[in-house]
Image (cartoon, coloured by chain):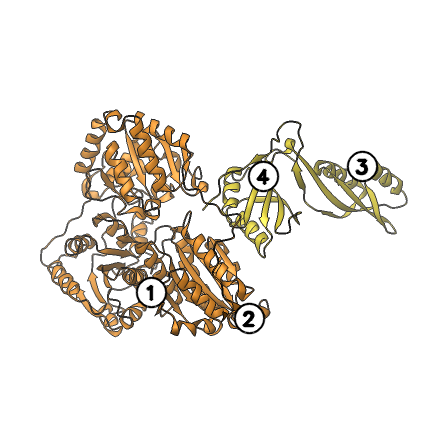
Amino acid sequence: MAAKHHTLSVLVENKAGVLTRVAGLFARRGFNIYSLAVAPTDDERLSRITVVVDVESKPLEQVTKQLFKLINVVKIDELAPDESVERELALVTVRAETGTRSQVIELVQVFEGKIVDVGHDEVTVMLAGHPDTIDDFEDLMRPFGIDDVQRTGRVALPKLERQAPRLRSVSGKVG
Amino acid sequence: MKLTGAQALIKSLEMEGTEVMFGLPGGAILPVYDPIIDSSIRHVLVRHEQGAGHMAEGYAHVTGRPGVAMVTSGPAATNIVTPLCDAYMDSIPIVVITGQVAYSAIGSDAFQECDTTGITMPVTKHNWLVSDPQDIPQIVREAFHVATTGRPGPVLVDVPKDISNQTMDWYWPESVDLPGYKPTSLGEPEMIRQAARLIGESRRPVIYAGGGILKAHAAETLRSLAEMTGIPVVTTLMARGAFPDSHELCLGMPGMHGNYTAVTAMQKADLLIALGSRFDDRVTGKVSAFAPDAKIIHVDVDPAELGKVRRPDVPIVGDCRAVIEELVAAIEAMGGADAQPDRSQWLAQVRAWQQDFPLHYEQSFDEGSALKPQYVLEQLRDSTPDDTIVVSGVGQHQMWTSQHWRFDHPYTWVNSGGLGTMGFAVPAAIGAKVGRPDRMVWAVDGDGCFQMTAQELVTATAERIPVKVAILNNAYLGMVRQWQELFYEERYSEVYLSPDLPDYKMWAEAMGCVGLRVEHPEEVQPAIDKANEIDDRPVVIDFRTDSTEKVYPMVPAGGPNDAIILDPSQGEGGR
């Protein structure tokens, strides 16, 4: 994914309607979301929203500042691509007829994917990896005929460094 | 102590110091209206829920305390969305309580159900849907805290009917539990020193004071900054009164209908000190051509405002009063007034603009001369106490009032700036009068605006709230007419309203007010005098004003501020 995208890891209070507040804010301030993943954290009072935003439409600074104004948003970490570990999971159903099945299986093995369902003339593959890898896999599968793709959207954590973490925390809470 | 949710709600409002609430009951809020009978809180029964919201805003504007409104679910909740949005745009602290269908019925399309928290999410600072009566004191405490701290704003608490009826164990929370809400108040010391240095280097500075000055109770502090440095001050539409108009350093209102000096001084400045202002498009005109040579110091309690429109050279997040106090101290530490550069040339230039391009209109007293709205306003201004609270709607009359009134005290000007809500004046004036019964309150309204919310004068009469209303009745949606005249080749589309349909005098009388009508310039003063003597009921004066009068100066929408158009009799201006 090009550099015009940025990943924000947003720690929010685990309360009803919080996702609506975050998603609604993006919509009404004109920020585009590329992907969104929400899950509980190890602290049951908090959830983590990992959101990939298009920073070409509006500067990232405005996105984070406006997000911070939401009362339920506790912390925002900006995860630059080269400073974070990003992963995504995809389920891909691809045509695999007698003539092409072995080629498909071979490629799945190259990508270290896993066939999780087999039908008469198609297979469903599970692949977890860097989002770019999943893009590549999709490209290579397309000639065989992709019937369905379901991607989870990326999740990310800051890269562990020997020095102090380069994770950039956005400071300054808003009234 | 066992209380019902409804009792706990009213008790919580009392604990927050609520003296008055504006509202209208209905099905889902019925349980909460019962304990009001036994409460110390005064309830003002409105005629339309929008009125309740604007009254709460007017109250908050003049008292600085949060206004409280309470209405039922469904259509009542949707009717109060406009005031919420208005308060959101102008950072007015109001707390709105809405009834909701029973919690168990939510999502079933029950009678008078609507997704109130969903609908109001984009127009509130925060909102809450109560799911347990035990949470009510905590939520009310948090609602008032959020509404009044940081950048103030509206909040909403949606209370399902069954929650109001259930019982809870009363408590009053010691503190709020908002881990994601920590407003910054003190400015960064290094930034403040940088700001002081920039000010000390500037030859042509202007203080660009916005509504944040009033929200932060920083009018006095602003004055000390201006006087110590000798820097002239413009006060935006939301900041009129934050710096006295009669002060020699006051340049008045900038922006689309600002005066020539305020607009031009900003354009020519080498430094803008933006204090609680947000570079609104109505102030900047074309952003890329706004104050092209100016460096920017931008102080705001909301970090998202810094750099939203114009990138500041020195951004300072903090409460205006605290930051200005620190700034004054930093300037003193650098030598104070004596260390400021000689700016006599700049001030002389500003004076020259003021002399050459004052606000201009001409009232003729010849037989049959049309009444000029500006003349009405100047007579009204000169016939009322200095601390009179003036409330306006939105349009030409609003701009003329802001231009021609002399605001020498903070919290004397109440209007709808950001949202531009027609119909704001009458209910907001009622709320202002409830908040400051000791003051004279005049609403200046347009005929179009008046027709949107006039029914609240019934509320004013019934509740003995003696507001006064001056309708500048030009029989048109005047501002739209002005744009059609100037930018649509005089093709007037759907702007004519008629001067005497409705008959405003009779309408006022039907609502229990005193109704007066003025058609000629010489009748203006006697009518105002008569209105000023009445203090036991509302008064409405229908001033029949010149339909063709336009608001000048004017910067055409989207144009650069250098393209300011003066009254045609004043020629091309200083360009």
Q: Is residue B411 left or right of residue B146?
A: left
Q: Which chain is yellow?
A: A
Separation of marks 3 and 1 at Cα, in angstroms: 67 Å
A51 versus B343 height, above or below: below
Separation of marks 4 and 2 at Cα, in angstroms: 39 Å
Separation of marks 1 and 4 at Cα, in angstroms: 47 Å
Q: Which chain is orange?
A: B
Q: Position of residue B361 (x, y in %)?
A: 18, 48
Q: Are marks 3 and 1 on the same chain?
A: no
Question: Would you name the residue on which mark 4 appears?
Answer: A77
Q: Are marks 1 and 4 on the same chain?
A: no
- Under circle 4, the secondary element is strand
| Residues packed near mark 4 inside 10 Å, few (<14), some (14 to 19) or many (20 plus) | some
| Residues packed near mark 1 inside 10 Å, few (<14), some (14 to 19) or many (20 plus) | some
Residue appearing at x 44%, y 60% in the figure:
B81
- The mark that comes first in sequence, 4 or 3, is 4
Whether residue B409 is visible: yes
User: Looking at this rendering, what residue extends furthest in the left direction?
Assistant: B366
Check contact, mark 2 vs mark 3: CB within 8 A: no
Amino acid identity at mark 1: Thr
